Image (spheres, grey):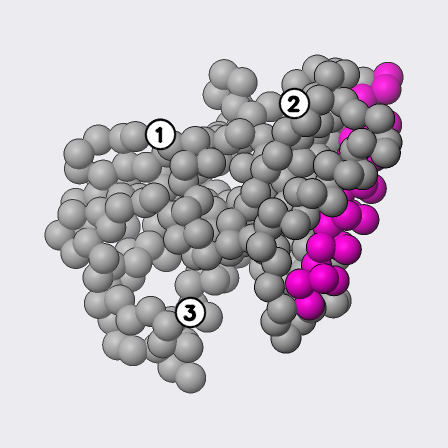
Amino acid sequence: MKPAAFDYVRLEDEAQACDLLARHGDEARILAGGQSLITVLNMRLAQPSVLLDVSRCEALDYVKVAGRMLEVGAAATQASVEWRPDLAAEVPLLACAFPYISHFQVRNRGTVCGSVAHADPSAELPLCLALLGGEVVLSSRRGRRTLAARDFFQGMLTTARAGDELIACVRYPLRVAGTGYAFEEFSLRHGDFAIAACAAAVSRDVIRLGVGGVADRPTVVQWPRLPKPELETAINDFAWTLGAQDDAHASAAYRRRLVRQLAARAIATAASRTQGDTQ
């Protein structure tokens, strides 16, 4: 299929984006890498009147450490983060998750902020942002505001972004010393959407587990370090709270089984990386 007709504006900077978003509101869509948006347009699931292209805004094409965060601008591609030489030391969970994200051709064009904006519950980057307690910075003519990931993701492909707001950047917390990280995912083929994905961060006292691909948004739970039998029970109870549904790809029961297995594996791997503080 072909998209409905739309106007196209190549943006120069963030201020121009905010001005045009204020003028067009929900009738506009931000185009960055386009890896999700173009498919949506071609299927006419969205029919905006104008596309605002931020992909060549130099001021928004950056990846940098800011305080205790890795900050990724709106125009920065996934590959520019993935191939960052120090990524495994800075945000090890991202280094674990990137190999599961589609294929390198997609990561070369797709942006981190675009994936977060699309809010697909099976996507890896939103899950990492939620598990780590990251932030989304939204910009408009009214100014900037910062939302925690848990407040930003509101449901299937639904976020707290207002129609006149641009996701200026996202911030992933840097590695915490003494914490191990791991990511596990199951899909029908490598690069396909996740049937279920689990991210884990384990410290001496705390286990954090995030699950994607099951509920309508990335879902995170936190426990103290538990003996194995109690941990298995906690994971099972958590799996039942996610509201898994039957669909063409897997049954709800199968998804719960995947969560139990992937979560146990991710937590064990993260815990092993805590020992010796190697990750």
Quadrant position of the N terminus in the picture: bottom left
Residue 175 numbered tag: 2
**CA distance separating discs 3 and 2:** 35 Å
Residue 146 numbered tag: 1
Q: Between 56 and 266, which is closer to the camera in this rendering?
A: 266
Q: Give the range drawn in magenta.
A: 251-276
| Main secondary-structure element of the magenta-colored stretch | helix
Q: Residue at x 26, y 66 (%)?
A: 48
Q: Which amino acid does label 3 sit on?
A: Val
**CA distance separating discs 1 and 3:** 27 Å
x and y, in percent, of residue 274 in the image: 80, 22
Q: What residue type is labelled 2?
A: Arg
**CA distance separating discs 1 and 2:** 21 Å
Sequence-first tag of 1 and 3: 3
- 148 left or right of 98 in image: left
Q: In this view, does 126 lie above or below 35?
A: above
Residue 40 numbered tag: 3
Q: Between 88 and 117, which is closer to the camera in this rendering?
A: 117
Q: Which residue is drawn at 60% across and 23% down?
A: 174
**Element marked by disc 3:** helix
Q: Is residue 113 visible?
A: yes
Crowd around label 3: few <14 · some 14–19 · many ≥20 (10 Å): some
x and y, in percent, of residue 193 in the image: 63, 62
Q: In this view, does 220 lie above or below 107?
A: above
Q: Does the magenta stretch include residue 260?
A: yes
Crowd around label 2: few <14 · some 14–19 · many ≥20 (10 Å): many
Q: Which amino acid does label 1 sit on?
A: Thr
Q: Residue at x 46, y 70 (%)?
A: 39
x and y, in percent, of residue 69 in the image: 52, 23
